[in-house]
């Protein structure tokens, strides 16, 4: 129950700082007086939203109390991000009621949402990397010495920032550090501190904050979230990592196909029932088993020797058999993406040789790779894998337009047949093959991307982080696809930094460190510890 | 923390969902997409209706043909410009290329070369300029704005140097007929415009070039990863734009029966305006040729109408500016 909403803009900064502390004090007193009483910060009733061809949200109910972490769960395309965008005012709703801090809101836009204390922390942060911590916190409201001239009082800026960080929030970050020198977790924390300071935000939305964090960083972020809870801030927390719910969440709401499948107190649920609600089916195994192991059979389809590129890749040699899944892993910056791009000819290598089916070949461009039957499913499908403005049909057939056009004129009948064939084969959920890809959900887009390479009859497929940012249900579906493809004799190279995924999926594992292969492991001899050992200490 | 009773709305939700299972577009969405595609034609018809009401001379055969003739040059340049804009680029050099190819053709025609040779040399100038533009952009990674801004000045300079700043007269009539002749009661320039339109429309809609042009404009990197030689097609669109500019040069020179080195200045902006009114997005990936053609005709109708109703020429600029901003605003609202 925030009694005071100080108008910071009109106050000198030093007073505003005391103000914040003061209002928190009042707040804490109130909290202790009325133990357990929590203000309802946000209430959504019957929210619906449609996009051309897709109903994204269907009469969704959602609420948020002060001092709680409300986890929002759902598969890709379940409507999480649409809901968030409605709360932050980025999208108008089609119907439903929004009540914020007891006030019914007719038309919520971005500016109003910000005034009401709603702040969303995205993965692409809005801090200015080349400015210091203090400069970022006070951006736009710097304390000035001689107000008329607007000369910034650096000393008071830094001291106020350190007081805000240390005394109010109890965080140990030097205000004179530049943002670019901080870790991602600390940046996220600062972003929240700034939002709370500059616009009194008390409804914080965090969208997959831990997806790029290490274990220690995650812990640091979680302890900060607990501090936020003490301060009475309500957090809407979106994550694909189900284990995190129990560590940080108070309540959990599950969305599926745009509707609310239920809101539960965390203690009342278990992971299995959550997964069932998310996917609509029970998941027996997060990592489905393959019927046959591929390693022993099949002849060699692809081999590289002594690949080198700038300072990024050194002396990379490995081979791939028909029907084999080769996992490539390593820490961030170990050269996984560089290797994937080199194999596909996007960034051609400086030296080294490629062999396809035993014959020496040259891969200098994606076209060379495609002609040799190699396909790449890049990490960022929206940015690299698909052309969102084109239809499903055009996307699937884009690499083979050359072969289905005569004198440069596309044979539309063949194009349509190919697209329809693969839409059926992969059960791609789309109203028609003429639908633009941007109107489809993330998992469906991934399938379109896959269909593209299957249609071009690729025999060697490279997956770069195939399940990043994808929920459990869709992950299993993708693992099944990869296994299926391997059984059909396709050679597969999976690049992933998720070690459990690599362990369960691959027949053989290559560990990279600083652009070099430090170890090649068979499935039986690999476990999490050995992989981590070679990824960090191997040479 | 106090526990709250959980909310179970599963059953209720399931029932609602059954009703909305249908993810096919509703009638309303179809209407909107129809309006989106044909709104520009609707605007043209409204303007046409306004013309009939405002001036008794508007709906005469000669006047309608006159409008088409007046918009011919802008239409042709805008067709080339549309290719460039869909790839996410821009070509500012078209006005100057028009002038350069105009003066070269005029001097060759003056010296008695055959019409075919004259036309080929004019179009060759367009191809060369487009090739240089495209090479600067694809090979040396210049921003399209900068590369074509440079070419705009270079081509204009060459035209002025070549003529010494003078206008060239005395062209052979077999050449000027392309700009000023009639086939029956239809101007040859209008016929050329429509032929070019249909060829370009076909390329954009039915060939791989067309598909790649849209793909590049929407997501260049993803297109490259599909094994498509992005640079080749980007080079091609600047050449197409150069060819269109030089064809416009043939028509303008024919119509004026003279070639001026300062001809066509500001035409690049008119062409961009026509494309934008027609629904092209300067961010790339969007636009179509029918829209561009209608956009150019809308600009022609406005000019004609303001002339017929004796509005001072200065107001024409003002009105066209308003139409450009208005058209884009309508488009932005439609997309929300």
Image (cartoon, coloured by chain):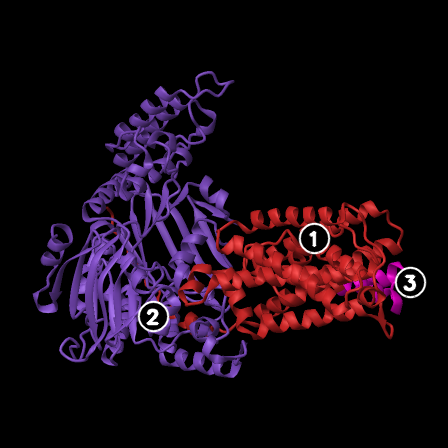
- Mark closest to the chain's N terminus, 1 or 3: 3
**Chain corresponding to red in the figure:** B
Q: Residue at horizontal 75%, vertical 62%? A: B250
Do badges 3 and 2 share one subunit?
no
Regarding mark 1 in the picture, which secondary structure is present there?
helix
Q: Specify whether residue A445 is in view.
A: no
In the drawing, what numbered circle is on residue B166?
Answer: none
**Chain corresponding to purple in the figure:** A
Is residue B256 toward the left or the right of residue A65 in the image? right
Number of residues whose C-alpha sits closer than 10 Å to that of mark 3, classed few (under 14), some (14–19) or many (20 or more)? some
Q: Position of residue B294 (x, y in %)?
A: 71, 64
Number of residues whose C-alpha sits closer than 10 Å to that of mark 2, classed few (under 14), some (14–19) or many (20 or more)? many
Disc 3 to disc 2, how far (Cα)? 63 Å
Query: Disc 1 designates what residue?
Result: B95
Query: Disc 3 designates what residue?
Result: B57
Query: Disc 2 designates what residue?
Result: A375
Using the image as rendered, state which of residue B224 and residue A86 is in the foreground.
B224
Foreground mark, 2 or 1, reads: 1
Magenta stretch: give its range: B45-69
Main secondary structure type of the part rendered in magenta:
helix
Is residue B134 toward the left or the right of residue A504 in the image? right
Q: Position of residue A342 (x, y in %)?
A: 30, 61
**Location of residue A215 with respect to A451 vertically, above or below:** above
């Amino acid at each position: 129950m925030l009694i005071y909403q100080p108008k910071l803009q009109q106050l000198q900064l030093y007073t505003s700082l005391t103000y914040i502390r003061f209002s928190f004090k009042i707040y804490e007193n109130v909290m202790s007086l009325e133990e357990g009483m929590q203000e309802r910060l946000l209430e959504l009733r019957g929210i619906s939203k449609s996009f051309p061809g897709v109903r994204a949200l269907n009469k969704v109910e959602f609420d948020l109390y002060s001092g709680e972490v409300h986890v929002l769960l759902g598969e890709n395309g379940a409507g999480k991000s649409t809901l968030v965008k409605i709360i932050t005012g980025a999208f108008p709703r089609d119907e439903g009621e929004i009540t914020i801090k007891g006030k019914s809101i007719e038309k919520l836009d971005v500016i109003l949402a910000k005034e009401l204390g709603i702040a969303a922390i995205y993965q692409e942060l809005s801090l200015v990397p080349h400015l210091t911590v203090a400069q970022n916190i006070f951006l736009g409201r710097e304390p000035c010495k001689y107000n008329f001239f607007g000369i910034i009082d650096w000393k008071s800026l830094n001291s106020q920032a350190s007081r805000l960080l240390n005394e109010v929030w109890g965080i140990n970050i030097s205000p004179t550090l530049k943002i670019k020198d901080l870790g991602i977790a600390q940046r996220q924390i600062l972003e929240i501190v700034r939002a709370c300071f500059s616009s009194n935000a008390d409804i914080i939305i965090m969208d997959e904050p831990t997806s790029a964090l290490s274990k220690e960083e995650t812990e640091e972020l979680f302890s900060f979230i607990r501090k936020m809870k003490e301060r009475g801030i309500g957090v809407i927390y979106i994550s694909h990592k189900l284990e995190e719910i129990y560590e940080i969440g108070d309540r959990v709401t599950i969305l599926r196909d745009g509707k609310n499948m239920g809101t539960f107190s965390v203690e009342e649920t278990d992971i299995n029932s959550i997964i069932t609600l998310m996917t609509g089916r029970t998941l027996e195994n997060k990592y489905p088993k393959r019927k046959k192991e591929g390693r022993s059979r099949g002849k060699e389809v692809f081999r590289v020797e002594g690949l080198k590129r700038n300072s990024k890749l050194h002396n990379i040699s490995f081979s791939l058999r028909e029907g084999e899944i080769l996992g490539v892993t390593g820490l961030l910056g170990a050269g996984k993406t560089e290797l994937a791009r080199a194999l596909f000819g996007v960034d051609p290598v400086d030296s080294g040789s490629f062999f396809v089916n035993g014959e020496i070949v040259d891969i200098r461009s994606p076209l060379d790779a495609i002609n040799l039957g190699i396909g790449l499913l890049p990490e960022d499908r929206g940015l690299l894998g698909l052309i969102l403005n084109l239809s499903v049909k055009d996307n699937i057939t884009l690499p083979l337009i050359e072969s289905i056009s005569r004198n440069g004129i596309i044979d539309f009948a063949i194009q349509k047949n190919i697209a329809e064939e693969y839409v059926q084969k992969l059960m791609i959920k789309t109203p028609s093959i003429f639908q633009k890809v941007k109107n489809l959900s993330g998992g469906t887009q991934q399938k379109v991307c896959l269909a593209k390479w299957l249609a071009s009859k690729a025999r060697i497929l490279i997956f770069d982080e195939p399940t990043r940012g994808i929920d459990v249900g869709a992950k299993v579906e993708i693992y099944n696809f990869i296994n299926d493809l391997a059984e059909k004799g396709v050679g597969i190279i999976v690049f992933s930094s998720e070690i459990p995924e690599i362990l369960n999926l691959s027949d053989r594992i290559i560990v990279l460190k600083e652009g070099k292969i430090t170890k090649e492991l068979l499935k039986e001899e690999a476990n999490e510890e050995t992989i981590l050992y070679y990824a960090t200490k191997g040479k | 923390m106090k526990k709250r009773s959980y909310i179970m709305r599963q059953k209720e939700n399931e029932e609602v969902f059954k009703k909305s299972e249908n993810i096919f577009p509703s009638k309303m969405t179809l209407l909107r997409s129809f309006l989106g595609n044909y709104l520009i034609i609707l605007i043209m018809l409204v303007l046409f209706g306004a013309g009939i009401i405002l001036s008794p001379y508007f709906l005469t055969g000669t006047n309608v043909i006159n409008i088409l003739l007046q918009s011919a040059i802008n239409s042709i340049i805008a067709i080339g410009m549309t290719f460039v804009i869909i790839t996410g680029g821009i070509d500012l050099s078209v006005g100057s290329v028009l002038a350069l190819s105009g003066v070269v053709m005029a001097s060759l025609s003056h010296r008695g070369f055959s019409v075919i040779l004259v036309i080929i040399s004019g179009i060759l100038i367009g191809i060369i300029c487009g090739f240089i533009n495209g090479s600067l952009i694809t090979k040396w990674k210049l921003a399209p704005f900068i590369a074509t801004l440079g070419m705009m000045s270079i081509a204009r300079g060459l035209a002025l140097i070549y003529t010494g700043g003078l206008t060239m007269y005395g062209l052979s009539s077999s050449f000027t007929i392309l700009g000023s002749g009639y086939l029956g009661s239809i101007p040859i320039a209008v016929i050329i415009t429509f032929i070019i339109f249909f060829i370009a429309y076909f390329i954009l809609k039915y060939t791989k070039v067309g598909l790649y042009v849209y793909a590049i404009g929407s997501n260049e990197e993803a297109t490259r990863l599909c094994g498509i030689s992005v640079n080749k097609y980007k080079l091609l669109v600047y050449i197409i734009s150069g060819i269109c500019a030089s064809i416009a040069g043939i028509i303008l020179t024919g119509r004026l029966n003279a070639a001026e080195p300062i001809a066509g200045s500001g035409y690049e902006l008119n062409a961009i305006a026509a494309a934008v009114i027609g629904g092209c997005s300067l961010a790339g990936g969007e636009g179509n040729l029918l829209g561009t053609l209608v956009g150019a005709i809308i600009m022609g109708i406005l000019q004609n109408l303001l002339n017929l109703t004796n509005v001072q020429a200065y107001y024409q600029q003002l009105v066209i500016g308003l139409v450009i901003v208005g058209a884009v605003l309508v488009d932005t609202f439609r997309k929300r």
